Image (spheres, grey):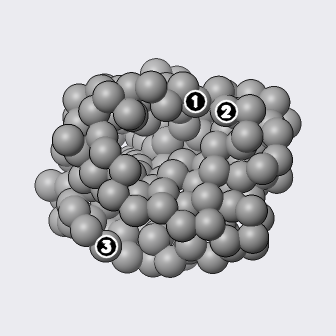
Amino acid sequence: MDGKILANLLVAANGATTQAGRSAPLSPPDDRRRFHAIRSQAKAIVIGGNTFRNEPYSRTPIPLYVATSHPPLDPPLDPPLQESGSTPLRCFLIKAPTEVVDRALTEQGAPILVEGGVRFLTTLIEKKVIDTFYLTRVPKRGDGNFFDDSLLNERYSLAHSEVENDTIFEVWKPR
């Protein structure tokens, strides 16, 4: 792992990042293996509200920070993170993605992993907040949440790329 703020995204051949609202149907076994290897190094995960509502984050074993304009009623908004038995540590914040990333980094230390969707990640790419961006390109076609990598190409450089079973794994660094 290289950097304090890591991000991970899977993109289908047509630029979609989801199939039927979720990324998992697009993810081949090689991607799942790499995803879990990256995640195992993180001290916290940062996502947006849409990702929280659409992906399975109920059993995340490390602190989870959610930037959302529609927080759930329970747990309370913006609590300090505390151990609560088998319940994952969660913090819902009505704040910009950069502020939530900063809070997670301050409270949990590095590295943190951003697993947010396209809108969430685009904000962080634009501001060059991400130190290492892991991008997986799969040959499948998705149906939603399309990623335009032109901003990534403008702000970041491809540091490494490899192909495994028709899946392209890329590592991007800020310019």
Residue 101: image location, x then y, percent: 27, 44
Compared to residue 132, the image places residue 22 above or below, namely: above
- Judged left or right of residue 127, residue 153 is right
Q: Residues within 10 Å of mark 3 (few under 14, many from 20)?
A: few
Give the residue drawn at x 31%, y 45%: 157
Question: Residue beneath label 3, please?
Answer: 1
Q: Quadrant of residue 126?
A: top left
Looking at the picture, how far across and down is residue 138, in whole percent? 71, 52
To which residue does mark 1 refer?
A: 147
Query: In the figure, 15 relative to 134: above or below?
Result: above
Residue assigned mark 2: 15
The one nearer the camera, 137 or 132, is 137
Residue at position x 32%, y 28% in the image: 154
The alpha-carbon separation of the residues under discs 3 and 2 comes to 26 Å
Residue 122's x, y, as percent?
41, 29
Disc on the earlier residue, 1 or 3: 3
Q: Is residue 30 visible?
A: yes
Considering the numbered disc 1 on the image, is that residue within a helix, a strand or a loop? loop
Check the picture and name the quadrant holding the C terminus.
top left
Residue drawn at the location 36% of the way across and 69% of the way down:
42
Q: Nearer the viewer, residue 55 or 158?
A: 158
Q: CA distance from mark 1 to mark 2?
A: 5 Å
Q: Residues within 10 Å of mark 1 (few under 14, many from 20)?
A: many
The amino acid pointed to by label 1 is: Phe
Q: Amino acid at mark 2?
A: Gly
User: From the viewer's perspective, is 155 left or right of 152?
Assistant: left
Q: Position of residue 59 (x, y in %)?
A: 61, 66
User: Upstream in the sequence, badge 3 or badge 2?
Assistant: 3
For label 2, the SS is: loop
- Seen in the image, is 85 located left or right of residue 55? left
